[in-house]
Image (cartoon, grey):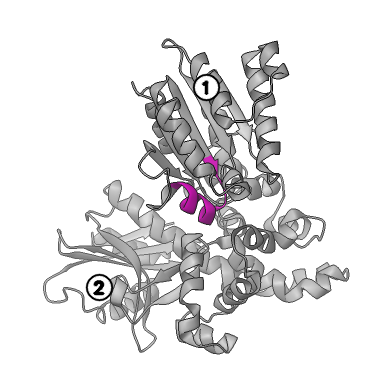
Amino acid sequence: MSRFVDRDSEMETLEREYRREEASFVVIYGRRRVGKTALINEFCKNKPALYYLATEESESQNRMAFHDMVADFLKTPLVSLASFERWDDLFALLAEAATPEERLVIVIDEFQYLGKANKAFPSIFQRIWDTLLSRSNVMVILCGSLVTLMSAQVLNYESPLYGRRTAQIHMRPLPFRFYGDFFENKNRRELVEFYSVTGGVPKYIELFEDELDVYRAISRNVLNPDSFLFDEPTFLLQKEVSEIGSYFSIIKAIAAGNQKAGAIATRLEVPQTHLSRYLKTLIALDMIEREVPVTERNPENSKKSLYRLKDNFLQFWFQFVQPGLSYLESGHAEMVLDRLKRSFIDRHVAYVYEDICRARLWDLSAQGEVPVFLEKVGRWWDASDGEIDVVGLSEVDNAIVLGECKFKNAPIGVDVLTALEEKGRRVAWSASDRAEYYVLFSISGFSDALREIAEQRPNVILVD
């Protein structure tokens, strides 16, 4: 991928830390392939920086490799010939190399492998920071892609390094609004289709960038047993959790439409209490999310909670690829692709489009196109199967925004607005005196009759 897109906020944080008068300690973490290393490389351009990528080898092997990196960076023959038995001595050399005039950036990527090789390493690095690096003109960046290990070793209260960091960056997939920067020749419908599979993960986007259409991209880069995306979910889980079978089964059950904890437990034939720790871990890994109706006053205690896959690629893979693995491995990819084409839009893309519209509502509010200061945006549903795709709430303006999303091949008409108004009457939130706005999202535009109504009614907003 030749372009470095977005990440303005993350880059601003790094630059601010680089300009600190004191030493800085930044932690960057997030799932694999999300662009952490690309961000670091972009930031380190034209700066004196030592970048070390830790491996899953033993601590001594990592220390020897780090020794070689330090020797090459300092360009001192005596360092390369000397033997170093302690990490402290290597970092002392780097601390001395940092001058008052020029700050040195020290990057340790995949830091969690050092703590995995030696459980005491976070304590060792705490000592190194406290006695050496914190007193020098350095910027330390610890980066990791195994979220559970990075949390335990660096971020959690129990970690020896807790309280040392001066900033932290949780890298997440790129928002949909930047997809036009990657796929310059695609229309909005095509962009949504590509996003529904790649989900904002830069490495996935790179594979799809030069493909003519989404089905060709899927065929070559996902359904192909030689592609790394073919078994990507298994790889991601293997790196993060030990009981991969249990987590795999839970994700599979959710992808199949079992969104209530009770339904998941029934599908897996286990007690519901057995699921709690697995669900919490998957939430921490940004793979799933717990969702409640946006109008709930106490979300944490709500009994209306649903679990859904947060990752577009995981949802796509478990819905369309996993059921056809045997066909794919036996050379019948066309059969799986034909089945996928029949329901790809209705069963997958249309739901991803709803997520895009919810994110878009924040933009519309910030730009003043929806004249409401929003505090919450989400979905709404009730026990009688009533559901509204997009709902925004504003306590300060005593206003509610009700939205409908349609990923259809034809313009939508007045009937969609009428149905939304009817459903809106069932939403009890501040029902007596609230201001109401209706936002209709359509990938294929709107009928002339609906456009006329929107021109006459300021509280009806059309977004295509």
Quadrant in which the C terminus is drawn: bottom left
What is the residue that sits farthest to the right in this orientation?
Answer: 331
What is the residue that sits farthest to the left in this orientation?
Answer: 433
Give the labeled residue for mark 2: 298
Q: Does 276 appear in magenta?
A: no
**Magenta stretch in the rendered image:** 143-154
Q: Residue at x 31, y 78 (%)?
A: 302
| 163 sits left or right of 187 in the view | left
Along the viewing direction, whichever of 401 and 410 lies nearer the viewer: 401
Quadrant in which the N terminus is drawn: top right
Cα distance between the residues tagged 1 and 2? 51 Å
- Of the two numbered discs 1 and 2 in the rendering, the one whose residue sits closer to the viewer: 1
Q: Give the SS element for disc 2.
A: loop
Mark 1: amino acid: Ala
Q: Residue at x 53, y 40 (%)?
A: 143
**Which label was assigned to residue 416?**
none
User: Residue 406 at x, y = what percent?
Assistant: 47, 68
- In the rendered image of this protein, does residue 394 appear above or below residue 426? above
Q: Residue 55: name its quadrant.
A: top right
Dot 2, crowdedness within 10 Å: few (<14), some or many (≥20)?
few
Q: Does 144 appear in magenta?
A: yes
Q: Which residue is drawn at 33% across and 83% down?
A: 382
Mark 2: amino acid: Asn
Q: Residue 236: name its quadrant.
A: bottom right
**Which label was assigned to residue 92?**
1
| Mark 1 or mark 2, earlier in chain | 1
Is residue 11 in sight in this rendering?
no
Q: Main secondary structure of the magenta part?
A: helix
Is residue 308 in sight in this rendering?
yes
Q: Give the SS element for disc 1.
A: helix
- In the rendered image of this protein, does residue 266 appear above or below residue 180? below
User: Residue 272 at x, y = what percent?
Assistant: 47, 85
